[in-house]
Image (cartoon, helix red, strand yellow):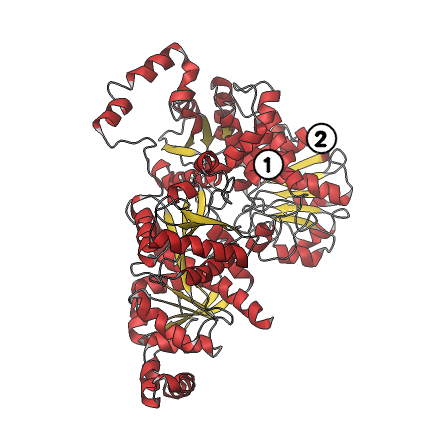
Amino acid sequence: MCAKVRRKEALDFHEVKPAGKIEVTPTKPLSSQHDLALAYSPGVAEPCKQIAAEPEDVYKYTAKGNLVGVISNGTAVLGLGDIGPEASKPVMEGKGVLFKKFAGIDVFDIEIAETDADKFIEIVKSLEPTFGGINLEDIKAPESFKIESELREKMKIPVMHDDQHGTAIISSAGLLNALELTGKKIEEINIVVSGAGAAAMACTDLYVALGARKQNIVMTDSKGVIREDRQDLNDKKRKYATGKDFYQLEDALAGADMFLGLSIANTLKPNWLKSMAKDPIVFALANPDPEISYELAMKTRDDIIMATGRSDHPNQVNNVLGFPYIFRGALDVRATTINEEMKLAAVQSIAELAKQPVPEMVLKAYGTVSMKFGRDYLIPKPLDPRLITTISPAVAKSAIDSGVARVKTKNWEEYEIELKERIGLDQRLISRIVTRARRDPKRIVFAEADDARILKAAQMTLDEKIGTPILLGNKRKIQQIVAANELDLSGCEIIDPQEEDAQLDKFAEVFFKKRQRKGITKKLARKAMLTRNYFGAMMVDQGVADALISGLSNDYPKTILPALQVIGVEPGVNRVAGMYIISNQKGNYFFADTTVNLDPTSEQLVDIIGLTARAVRFFDAEPKIAALSYSNFGSAKGAVPSKVARAVELAKAKWPDLVIDGDIQANVALSNDLIDEIYPFSSLNGEAANTLIFPNLESGNIAYKLLMELGGAEGIGPVLMGMKKSVHVLQVGSSVRDIFNMVAIAVVDAQTSNLRAEL
């Protein structure tokens, strides 16, 4: 289940400039008059003439081949109903974000003010020259059936109503695997369907395509069983009308093998569940609350195999497992439609993926040491990076084999590489970290709780169930900010160090003993504990809390000093260092040191390299390290190249298996082609760097800030490496999202710190 979302938080999220969730970004340079002449007049005339002569070249010279239209009239928005086209726009933008995030597909969302099905069809059909595919969304039944059916007939690009087919494809994969576990055959099972809307019909149709028999299917709607003698049935419902002596859902469930729910909460009663056959398959997919709660179903039958639409229970039927990758495969072979063969290929590939060994990064993301095919793992997880390289090729191959692809052949090995490059498989890093954090939430001290951004991040920490915030600051001021921002932090402890005499005395005594031979007197120790950074650090040191977050309103050195004096560095570590994670479409890159060490020596760079390599592995990546300078392997002389080359020599001696090289320039380190062509001897040959070690603080700090401001990259950090316990220092100006990201990292850091301490 998703974390609770508050009205003001959601409105603020969408309102912050630029408003909404999407924008159009040029893909070609437009920095000169010549660029503009190529992009528009007169240069644009050449591709126009070429496309006029060869219409298929539109895929060669324009973005059509990677552009999907997400189109709705807002008549059946999930959970909201008929709210109209304008009100549906945030949902359609959201769908576009998912297309981009999971499959690298660009989207224009189009909301159409038309409820007449024929006129709607005419409008969408006229858009065919623009798009490579059409995703219909949130259109009410029965009009949605007619709209999709006719558009598929009339258009020569893929058209899919995801509300119908997305759920059908994912649940079909789950059904196949459930049948395998129970030893039942699809052509023999009795299926009861609660609900007769677009999704229910599409699921049932696909089950039949997989081998289920119509005579073994009973469907119900709000009036009861859909029977042959009912006079109120449309053509879709009549297809599944039964002549059996069933009138209500309860009647049909006796002895049934499968229950498919796409209706409303609490439709399936425990006694009815008890009447089902051995090893019942229950897919209760109503959202947000299923037809029977997971806990009640498990309590009622110990032989049940269950799926829901919720993320907080096993076997989530989530459409994001399907539509991005199905469209990706269809677009990449220029399919003219998404046919049954392609849908079935998606079903089979999803089902098969669930049977494969689960990668370590997925196990870590979901906070478990084991995940294997079985009753609680019928369907792959949404954060599984293999989805795109499993489903998209299967769909593309099926399109070619079934004769609906314009691209007739494809190099499948190169295609897999292309798919990975489109999205950067590591782009879901924070999602994985948050999921890991939920496994073992920690107590987080927020030293600057009199800032609205900190309190909003604390609210997210609670809502995402990754930790318990402890708020330091003036209680009255904090409560005023909480009320002004409509937050609910009533369960959080608020501590003002100025009012904690007993705790102050205790902490001051501990601090005095730590620093009495380093110039600290008892009076100075108590004065230090009056400040929130010292007080918060001591809370972590003494086990009152697990992690400290601070730095939003202080310079980095002023924030880190109290933590170093109170908590100190990890045993065996000579220094701390700071690392930033820079994310873009190509993936994640790790920059160090960007925040702590001013001008490290070669030996100190080795310490930084060791800390960074460990931190990169913490984020489920294998470090491929480039030690940077302005020289390539001695091509220029100077103190920096010499220092860096010496550090690399020492690091290789200390960690022979570590992939590292330098001195090397940044552009060369990041280019496989340049290394292969000019420096084939390098350890990075075939291993373009993902981890950059800077020769000094100024170069690292400047580099990451420039990339974040000018390069369109997203930065996560700074991650403080080498502390004995979890302490992370924010950058001045961090956003709420930046702060929350650091909280998630701090929680997982605290988890691993505890494990290291136990060892």
Q: Nearer the viewer, residue 390 or 651?
A: 651
Rendering quarter of residue 514: bottom left
| Residue where numbered disc 1 is placed | 390
Alpha carbons under labels 2 and 1: distance apart? 23 Å
Judge left or right: residue 14 versus residue 687. Answer: left
Q: Secondary structure at mark 1?
A: helix
Q: Residue 212: horizontal and vertical position, in percent?
A: 71, 32
Q: Residue 359: horizontal and vertical position, in percent?
A: 61, 48
How many circles with numbers are drawn on the protein? 2
Sequence-wise, which precedes: disc 2 or disc 1? 2
Q: Residue 656: horizontal and vertical position, in percent?
A: 56, 54
Judge left or right: residue 351 versus residue 424. Answer: right
What residue is rendered at 37% in x and 51% in y? 641
Asked whether residue 142 is in view, the answer is no
Q: Nearer the viewer, residue 520 or 388?
A: 520
> Which image quarter is the C terminus in?
bottom right
Q: Nearer the viewer, residue 27 or 458?
A: 27
What residue is rendered at 27% in x and 19% in y? 43
Q: Characterize the local packing of mark 2: few (<14), some (14-19) or many (20 or more) Cα atoms within 10 angstroms.
A: few
Q: Secondary structure at mark 2?
A: loop
- Residue type, numbered disc 1: Thr
- Residue type, numbered disc 2: Gly
What residue is rendered at 46% in x and 74% in y? 545
| Residue where numbered disc 2 is placed | 211
Q: Is residue 435 above or below residue 518?
A: above
Rendering quarter of residue 318: top right
Asked whether residue 442 is in view, the answer is yes
